[in-house]
Structures are given as C-alpha cells and as structure tokens.
Image: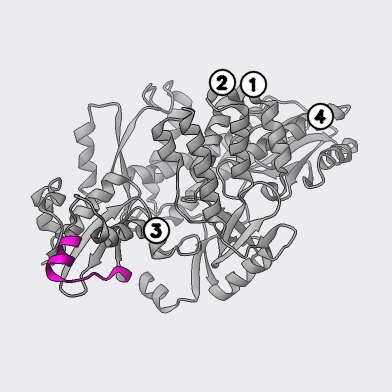
Amino acid sequence: MTKLFIKNNPDVLFTRADKGNTVVALNKHDYVQKMEKLLSDNNTYNIQKRNPVNNIISDIKTLLKRWKQHDIISRSSYSRLNTLNPVLPRAYGLPKIHKPGYPLRIIVSSTGSPLHNLAAFLHDIIHKSLPESDSFVKNSFQLTSRLSSLSIPEESILMSLDVVSLFTNTPVELVIRSLERRWTNIETNTSLSKTEFIKAVNLVLNSTFFSFDNVVYKQTFGVPMGSPLSPIVADLVLQDLETHSFNLLPFKPDFYFRYVDDVVLSTTRSRMDAIVNIFNAYHPRLKFTVEVGGEQINFLDTTLIKNRNTILHDWYHKPTFSGRYLNYFSCHPHNQKISIITSLVDKVVSLSHPMFHQKNFDMIINILLTNGYPIEIIFDNIKKRLHKKFFNDKPDDNGTEYNNEKVYFTVPYVEGISHKFKYIFKDDPMISMAYTGLNRLSRFIRAQKDILPQESRSNVVYRINCNDCEASYVGQTGRLLKTRINEHRNHINRNTTQTSVITEHRISLSHDFDWNGVEILDEETILNNRLISEMIFIGRQKQSLNLQTDTDLLDPLYMTLFTEK
C-alpha cells in the first residue's frame, strides 16, 4: 500500500523531522521552494556555473601521489583515500516542525564524495591526538553525573548560549591556527609533516561545494557542512574561544558545560552580559544567542532546576517528542524490544532526580502501552532492570573484557528461524549475533538528496542485455558503473590477451548490447555481500553469458531457490 501510494503521488515527499522520531509529509514543490530560498542567501552560498568535481579529484590525486612517492602513506592507505567518484556532496532539508511555518534545516551529505575519506582520515588523527576539553559533555548522562556533586551560590542563575550556524561561521584561518598550536600533540600520531598535514586540511576545508536539485553551490564562508573533519576542527576553535574569553574575564562561571555548539552555565545576573559580550567579541562571524533560564533551564534531554545551592535534574522532552518507539508487534527480535524498556528505565533513573521518578515511570509505562507492549512484560522488565542497577554488583556489560573486540555475525531477522544461529556461536565470547530487518521504513522515508544518475552510482550489481537476442551478462563493481561499462564496451578495441564473454558474443554473432539500458539489480557496499548478490542474479538469467565458474562459490542448494522458473 505504501509503495502504491508513493507511486501514485509523486508530488508528496516523506522524510523525518529535524528533531524527534517523527515522519513528515511534504509537498515537493513547497520543499524545493523553501530550500532554494535558504540557498539564495548570498552571504553564505553562491551558485557555481561549472561543476568543480574534476578539479577536486585532480587536487587530491596530486596530494596522495606525493604522499605515496615519499612513503608517507602505505599503498593500502593510498587506495582507501583515493576516492575518485565524481559526485559532489548533496544537500537536503529537514523540517523543523516545532517552529512556525516549518522551516528547513540544510543538511549536506558528503558520503561517497571525493574528499570524504581524506576528511575522515584527518579527523581520526586529530581525535587520537587531542584530549577532550574540560567543558565537554558527550551526552545528558555525563552532564547529570558531573552536576550531581556541584554546589553553586544561591544568587546565581542558569543560562544557555548557542552558537549561530557554527559550521558556516567558523573561520578557516582560526582552524589552522588551532591546529598549529596543537601540532606537538598531533605529530605523535601521524607520519605527515606539519606542512603536508595543513595542506590536506586546507584542501578539505576550502572545498565547500555541494549540489541541490542539480544546481551546484559553494558555501562562501566557514568549514564545509557534512564533512567528517568539520565537527572536530570547529570544536577546537570553540575551545580556543573559551580559553581566550575566560582569561579576559575577572571571574569564572559556577559551572560551564558545552555539547557541540550548545552551552549551559551558571553565574550571577550581574555577570551575564560580560560573559556574552566577551564571547561575541572573539570574531565577527562567531556569535552566540542567549537564553536566561533563571531558576531552571532545558538543556539536551534534561531540565536543570536550581534548588538553593544544588542542581536537580529531570528528564526533558522537546516539543517534537512523538513517544514513538519500536512497536511490540513489529517483526524484530524479542531482545531488541526488551532493550527499549531497559533504555527507558535507565533514562528515568539517570536523567531525573528521585523526586521525579514516579511521574517519569508513569510516563514510560504509558508510552510502552501505546507502542503495544503487554503490561506484564513492562512491569517484569522494569523490575529486572532496577534490580540489576541497584542490587547487582556486576557491570552492565556483564564484566566481559571482550566488549570492545567482539565480532558481530549479522543475519536478516525471520521470526522462528534467525535466533537459532546464536547456538552456533554460544561458546565463543568473541562473536555475538546481530539482526537486520527485512522491511524498513527507510525505504520510503528518506533524506531527499538529489538522485544520482545511474552511471554515477557505485557498489552495484548490474545486467547488460543483448540487443539482438535474450542473452545477458551480470557483473558487479565497487567503482562507478560508467567506468565499468566503458571497459566492457571498449574491450573489443583493445589489443589484449584477456578474454571477455561479451566481446566473444559480439564478434561471433555480430550482436551488440544495450549500453544505454544497463540495469542496476542491487546496491551493496560490502564486497562479499555484493558477490553473493551477483551470483544469485547470474543464476536467475534466462540465457546467461557468464562463465560457469562465476557461481562456483554459491551452494547449488541456494541456486535452486533463486533460479527463476
């Protein structure tokens, strides 16, 4: 029904909301108009007349060849970083359903773009080299833990700061300065010289191109949205801003914690303006908005409440909270459903003061009931989890020392069948079972990125059909489909001893193939999975040109299941 509705209503888009587990239906024309209005901001974006992707590929090839020639990186690292897919990062919008008019937040996906792997490589070096700042909190659990032992003056108030559009306002020159200042730490985790490292960072940060609706844009200032490198370097700039500002202030806040670009702190009302003014004076592009909470304030998943000299905390839900969790009657393993109950209990206990536990337990019971969970299962598992947290001396990971080294064996979940695989590995503490769903809403509810042209897709299983008979050839490639098809097509003109069943068919029968009608049968990023898919589709052909050895690795039992009758 869902597929049929989408097919019959091409002007309706389904996506997720910017915040909250909520599905949003949008009119396609309205969506495109809102995105184009945001991208028309000439202070932040410019339309490009030419696609710069080939220049980017040329720059990265030059950089990586130099590194390989000087033995700075291994051959395997060169191959991993040398991603030559000519595809720019793609932008899409997520609706902010908690705001009037449902404006969009621009998101850029750089996965598969030429600089993505290099950016991730640089990120990993920086992440391994530098400690977290004292102000850093990774989630609400860490925040409440750090606040639990603090005492603040009774006259202090609670307030929060929020950086305005962090990525599009983080100056690249401040990033470079931050990295140079920390080079003595970074150089211990890389064979790159300081000069080469900074060149690579500049290459990534200055390539701020992306596409939307087949139009190429350039982000005119800041670090590139969607790049794996941007979050960590923007964080370094904010660390420097904090150090600089606190050195100038003649006082310190009672406490100060930051999650990415959101800050919560406590100070007296008379000192509030001084803090904001010092922060906003650091750079003309880096500005902070302020929310004064007074006696309480919402931050992440918590409401912080001032109680004389202490801070109490309660579990907070944003206005976009839908209360939608994994439904009990969905086709998922039972242990995943029990994990939903466990995680909700943990949030009640860790994110709220005991005085709020009763109301929060009432809330999660109602949420679970709404999602189809039987009352006896709810109470039984709440009781078990509370007993484990308060009366069991064992840690939540059952004390295993293998937790960070486990290998997961993943199979599709089929009720009554898939769970039996776990008995194969029951005596091996290094292997755990994991399950994937066969039917996912993500097939229909997805980010509205530009659809790649067929020839620009990679990691695919494909079929080439003969124009003159029913013969066909099935293959797979991790490269661009266009590159692989051109190799098939031009093989007939090459002076080579390497044989090709396609070329032999063309020569022996004077047939040709439908080069413009190549079919994509499957997409799979994992090579072994792609090879299995290729063998299955080879077996389903009516008149296959593939060699018999192409399916040798697939058991004949499976071939009888997948072969078309």
The span from disc 1 to disc 4 (Cα, nearest Å) is: 24 Å
Is residue 436 rendered to the left or right of residue 240? Answer: left
Q: Is residue 94 above or below residue 289?
A: below
Q: Nearer the viewer, mark 4 or mark 2?
A: 2
Is residue 282 rendered to the left or right of residue 562? Answer: right
Where does label 2 land, which residue? 188
Query: Dividing the image into 4 quarters, which one contains the C terminus?
Result: bottom left
Residue 510 painted magenta = yes
Q: What range is drawn magenta here? A: 502-516
Q: Nearer the viewer, mark 1 or mark 4?
A: 1
Q: Is residue 232 above or below residue 525?
A: above
**Rendering coords of residue 122 (x, y %):** 55, 35
The residue at the far bottom in this view is: 8
In the image, what residue type sits under mark 2? Answer: Thr
Where does label 3 land, which residue? 457
The span from disc 1 to disc 2 (Cα, nearest Å) is: 7 Å
Numbered disc 1: secondary structure: helix
Where does label 4 land, which residue? 246
